[in-house]
Amino acid sequence: MKASAYHNKINSVEQINKEEHPCLYLIFPFNFSLLIIIFLSLLFAIFHTFNINLFTIPSALLSSEQKSMSSSKSTLQEEIALQLAAALDTARIARDTPAETPLPEPTSISLSEISVPAHGEKFGTISSARLGLNLSLIYGDTNAILKQGAGMYEGSKLPGSAGQTIICAHNTAKYFGPLEHAEIGDILHIQTSYAEYDYEIAETKVASMYDTSTYDLNTTEETLILYTCYPFYGAPGKKDRLFIYAKRIAGPSLMS
């Protein structure tokens, strides 16, 4: 069958159906329009529902968030206020509390107020930051004492007294070895059981161990004298001594 004949036959069939069943061709457009109306109604209802949710629910959430932020802000302001109040209280207390004035160090100490060290007693230290010197100061200068630290000759004067304070020690690094590098102007510090003293080196010299002019036990001029074997290297039994003379620049005087 040719295509043109087929289409003519289809058209003739549709014409017959329309003539035999005219209602079908009227109802079908009506039903389609009704479906469109229902669909649009549903779509409007859905949009209306979401419209409420989009504008009402976020508003509620925003209101809750604003309340939370307002509460947090209020709490932060309260904390800042408390901190400020505490700082003001501290400043007020500091202002109203009189500053403690340190007690001035005594310029003199009575000899009767201190205990004179016993033979072999450690009663202080002798040190120098620049020289790296730091050892015990012991009353007496026997061989046993010199194995423990620096020994003070008992016939000399205690630090702070009028007269000469004479201290000796071995010339090894553990004892007076650092004095090899001593220079005029270096500071020596003596800490005793009764006071602290600073001495400034004024002179250094090498002399025979038999030279009695290196000290004067009868003078009233206050001087610290340190001495040790010289030179610092070689075999023991050396006959020379390195003498260091220093003047007190800080610390109280001992008064008899």
Image (cartoon, rainbow, N blue to C red):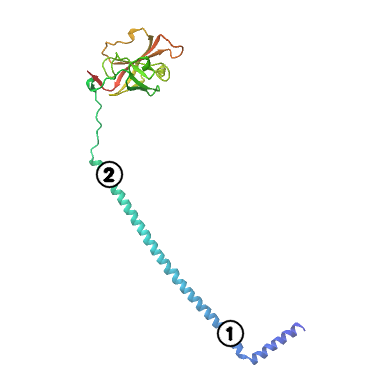
Image x and y of residue 92, in percent: 25, 44
Instruction: Report which quarter residue 30 is drawn in.
Output: bottom right
Q: Secondary structure at mark 2?
A: helix
The image quadrant that residue 251 belongs to is top left
Which quadrant would the C terminus be assigned to in this image?
top left
Mark 1 sits on what residue? 29
Task: Measuring from the top left, give residue 91's x and y in whole percent.
Answer: 27, 43
User: What type is the residue that disc 1 sits on?
Assistant: Pro
- Labels in figure, total: 2
Q: Is residue 21 left or right of residue 63?
A: right
In the rendered image, residue 194, in percent from the top left (x then y), is placed at: 27, 24
Residue lying farthest to the right in this orientation: 1
The numbered disc on residue 90 is 2
Closest to the observer, 15 or 206: 206
Q: Which of the 4 image quarters holds residue 10?
A: bottom right
Query: Where in the figure is residue 65, as x and y percent of width and height?
Result: 39, 61
Quick one: 49 or 218, which is closer to the camera?
A: 218
Badge 2: how crowded within 10 Å, few (<14), some, or many (20+)? few
- Which residue is at 29% across, 47% downward? 86
Q: Secondary structure at mark 1?
A: helix
Q: Are marks 1 and 2 in contact (CB under 8 Å)?
A: no
Name which residue type carries label 2.
Thr
Nearer to us in this view, 244 or 45: 244
